[in-house]
Image: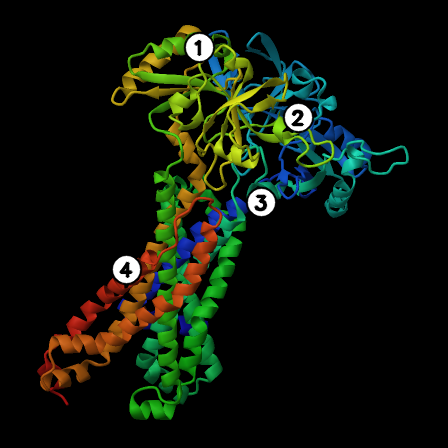
């Protein structure tokens, strides 16, 4: 039976080659797109799940409760992990991590190396995060204060393929002993590092650290089932953890302190956590939903193609079915035969799709920034779900055609030469409905692609309050730090340099959140409120406003001629003035409360500038002069970039032995929108492919049904019909279908795009233009896909068609 069915399938495909190729091409494209999206989504969902027992690992996140302006932090205070480990027996191990953002310099006998990606962690780090070890003992590797653990790549770089445990590396003025080598951290990790230093050597009294949210705190529970009750205990016991209890053990926190804790599963951090001071840039579940929706929609378009063309071909196969029924074939056998035909057809598309995915994978990696290898296509975790999709796809695509074909009445079919019964109007209605669905989906995707593009263009063109172009950012690191002023002076002497400035952060990088005191706000919250507030604080020098071209709207800039500016001058942005409700802010008293407090007054106000992403509103910011410098921003004069960069490098080498390092501010700032840009590129690509599939399907359906009307066209031409009138008559049904499809897509497209735009604080206004573009694009492409068929049929010689009538 199977052999006979495959023989019939092969004959049917060769008999209707053009339609089979259209069907095959559509299904292949749909499956290829879906496989690529599956790879992307699976990778995004796999973050941190490579860790053994990842279900038991949690990050402790504190939330500062502040009258509705709650703020959740990815970092916490140093005392927290030891306190939790003592208090809760369900914790198997806990560890703290400090991120080292700067350069780590290493020297060998003959070379000098600069490395990034170092962390400082407790000795229990590898008990919480069980990274496989290549050399050394993971349980004791971080016990030695003068030791360090490195990745396999670094071990090979410095020591070749030998065991480096016990060997030495010079780090600045210190000599470090290699105590272990771990496997390279996978790309699908929210933590990325190559070097681990022991906490004892960097922060010996970390257990006593309070009021400084510097540590990433993780715990491993004894079992995953303890997660929910543990989280509840954290939320309920925050005041006990801080020791805010009276003599009877009752809550007694200070009136101005409200806290809460939550336990974030490590596997959820990358996609769901967007807390203050995240270790790296996280993605979002919204992106996952978008790509899953795209994969489903493209597959739906491909399935609709198959169903429509199969229904069209049912007319040509009606006599075949009638004869098979006459000689004894049952409806059940026919139904199964057509289902097997659909499976065979979709399997061919599946095999071709796997080959195509392997071929385009390098380009897809470039598009997405991923590192997929062709070997993933042989992984059971890829093959199993893809085969499941093939199984469902084959059944769904073959179900309705099999029902229609197997239901033909053999007597009426053989008598009339076509299928008979009530299935005719139903088939027409279904065909039109499916075509409307196809082009509605395509229109929705076109609207989405254009709106995403418009939003990204808006971000690039919007006034962000500072000039990000022609600025080179040089990190202040290593031995440069103590000679930074000499370096700046040398840089300013270069003819291609307009100005330069030191700062603790540059736009696009995190600006620290610290405590200040606004005396005018004392008592505004009642009780013993002393006007203490938390806000973004940036340490700068006298040239910051000039170099970034910020707009000063009140007061004055910092001045080297006013020696007191370094000790007592503060500049706020508009958001801070609004937040603190300061009327006439110039001259108002202001205090910096972190570290060594600094008392002074406000000397200026700058217009709001987007020092962070446009996903969120501009936050209150205070700038003051403080020798806390992480970067030197250098504004270049246009036209002499390469020459000036060479001069900056020469100045660097005069004061530093570290390798020269720099980046352009506009590039690093725009990197914040990498996820949106990737989404935009992929949506555009998949939209084009979806349109191609839809238009191919329309072409196939139109070519078949217009071919059935060849006699009608010939008679109309004989009676004097023009080509124009024939064009209108033959194409009007499909033009109406495209119009209806765009109307159907209007509301859901508007709803979905508006929801996506809501995540941007600054966004384009949703207009009718993308919908008009979608209508025009889909109409033109649809019309182009049918015009050839229509013109070919309209140009047929009536005498040739009607000579045998």
Q: Residue at x 47, y 80 (%)?
A: 333
Q: Which mark is residue 777?
A: 4
Q: Which mark is residue 561?
A: 1
- Disc 2 and disc 4 in contact, CB within 8 angstroms: no
The relative height of residue 799 versus residue 51 in the rendered view (above or below) is below
Callout in the foreground (1, 4): 1
Residue on which the image places disc 3? 272
Tell which circle, 3 or 2, labels the residue nearer the N-terminal end.
2
Gap in angstroms between the C-alphas marked 1 and 4: 63 Å
Q: Residues within 10 Å of mark 2 (few under 14, many from 20)?
A: few
> Horizontal and vertical percent for residue 205?
72, 18
Q: Which mark is residue 248?
A: none
> Horizontal and vertical percent for residue 255?
75, 35
SS of the residue at dot 3?
helix
Task: Say if residue 21 shows up in the picture.
Answer: no
SS of the residue at dot 2?
loop
Q: Residue at x 69, y 26 (%)?
A: 211
SS of the residue at dot 1?
loop
Residue on which the image places disc 2? 212
> Horizontal and vertical percent for residue 166?
63, 14
């Amino acid at each position: 039976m199977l052999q006979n069915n495959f023989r019939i399938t092969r004959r049917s495909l060769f008999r209707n080659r053009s339609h089979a190729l259209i069907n095959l091409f559509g299904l292949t494209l749909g499956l290829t797109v879906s496989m690529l999206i599956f790879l992307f989504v699976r990778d995004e969902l796999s973050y941190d799940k490579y860790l053994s027992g990842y279900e038991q690992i949690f990050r402790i996140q504190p939330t500062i409760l502040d009258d509705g302006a709650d703020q959740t932090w990815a970092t916490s205070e140093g005392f927290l992990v030891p306190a939790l480990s003592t208090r809760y027996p369900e914790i198997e191990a806990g560890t703290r991590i400090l991120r080292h953002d700067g350069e780590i310099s290493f020297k060998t006998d003959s070379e000098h190396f600069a490395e990034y990606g170092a962390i400082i962690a407790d000795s229990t780090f590898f008990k919480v995060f069980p990274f496989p070890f290549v050399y050394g003992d993971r349980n004791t590797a971080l016990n030695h204060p003068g030791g360090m653990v490195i990745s396999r790549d670094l071990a090979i770089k410095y020591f070749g393929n030998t065991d480096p445990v016990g060997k030495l590396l010079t780090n600045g003025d210190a000599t470090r002993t290699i105590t272990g080598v771990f496997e390279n951290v996978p790309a699908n990790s929210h933590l990325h590092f190559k070097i681990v230093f022991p906490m004892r050597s960097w922060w010996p009294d970390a257990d006593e650290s309070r009021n400084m949210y510097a540590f990433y705190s993780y715990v491993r529970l004894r079992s995953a089932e303890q997660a929910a009750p543990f989280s509840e205990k954290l939320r309920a016991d925050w005041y006990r953890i801080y020791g805010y209890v009276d003599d009877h053990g009752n809550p007694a926190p200070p009136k101005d302190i409200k806290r809460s804790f939550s336990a974030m599963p490590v596997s959820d951090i990358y996609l769901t956590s967007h807390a203050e001071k995240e270790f790296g840039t996280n993605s979002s579940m919204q992106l996952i939903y978008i790509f899953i929706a795209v994969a489903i929609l493209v597959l739906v378009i491909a399935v609709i193609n198959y169903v429509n063309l199969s229904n069209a071909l049912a007319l040509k196969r009606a006599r075949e079915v009638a004869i098979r029924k006459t000689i004894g074939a049952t409806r059940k056998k026919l139904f199964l035969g057509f289902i097997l035909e659909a499976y065979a057809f979709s399997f061919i598309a599946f095999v071709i799709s796997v080959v195509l995915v392997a071929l385009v994978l390098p380009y897809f990696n470039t598009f997405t920034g991923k590192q997929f290898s062709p070997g993933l296509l042989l992984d059971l975790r890829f093959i199993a779900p893809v085969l499941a999709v093939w199984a469902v796809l084959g059944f769904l695509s073959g179900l309705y055609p099999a029902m229609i074909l197997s239901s033909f009445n053999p007597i009426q079919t053989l008598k009339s030469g076509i299928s008979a019964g009530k299935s005719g109007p139903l088939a027409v209605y279904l065909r039109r409905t499916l075509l409307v669905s196809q082009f509605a989906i395509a229109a929705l995707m076109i609207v989405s692609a254009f709106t995403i593009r418009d939003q990204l263009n808006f971000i690039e063109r919007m006034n962000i309050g500072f000039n990000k172009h022609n600025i080179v950012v040089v990190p202040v690191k290593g031995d440069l730090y103590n000679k930074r002023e000499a370096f700046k002076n040398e840089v300013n002497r270069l003819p291609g340099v307009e100005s330069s400035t030191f700062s603790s952060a540059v736009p696009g990088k995190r600006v620290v959140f610290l405590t200040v005191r606004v005396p005018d706000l004392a008592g505004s919250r009642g009780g013993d409120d002393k006007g203490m507030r938390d806000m973004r604080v940036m340490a700068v020098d006298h040239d910051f406003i000039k170099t970034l071209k910020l707009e000063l709207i009140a007061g004055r800039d910092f001045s080297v001629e006013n020696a007191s500016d370094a000790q007592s001058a503060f500049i706020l942005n508009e958001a801070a003035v609004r937040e603190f409700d300061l009327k006439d802010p110039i001259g108002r008293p202001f205090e910096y409360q972190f570290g060594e407090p600094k008392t002074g007054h406000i000397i200026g106000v700058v217009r709001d500038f987007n020092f962070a992403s446009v996903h969120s509103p501009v936050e209150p910011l205070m700038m003051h002069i403080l020798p806390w410098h992480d970067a030197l921003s250098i504004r270049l004069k246009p036209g002499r970039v390469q020459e000036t960069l060479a001069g900056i490098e020469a100045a660097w080498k005069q004061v530093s032995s570290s390798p020269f390092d720099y980046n352009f501010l506009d590039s690093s700032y725009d990197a914040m929108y990498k996820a949106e840009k990737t989404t935009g590129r992929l949506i555009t690509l998949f939209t084009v492919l979806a349109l191609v599939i839809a238009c191919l399907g329309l072409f196939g359906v139109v070519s078949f049904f217009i071919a059935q009307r060849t006699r009608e066209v010939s008679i109309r031409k004989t009676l004097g019909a023009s080509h124009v009138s024939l064009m209108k008559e033959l194409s009007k049904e499909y033009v109406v279908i495209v119009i209806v499809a765009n109307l159907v897509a209007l509301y859901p497209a508007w709803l979905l795009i508006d929801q996506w735009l809501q995540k941007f604080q600054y966004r384009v206004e949703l207009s009718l233009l993308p919908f008009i573009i979608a209508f025009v694009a889909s109409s033109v492409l649809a019309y182009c896909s049918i015009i050839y068929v229509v013109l070919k049929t309209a140009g047929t010689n009536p005498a040739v068609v009607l000579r045998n009538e």
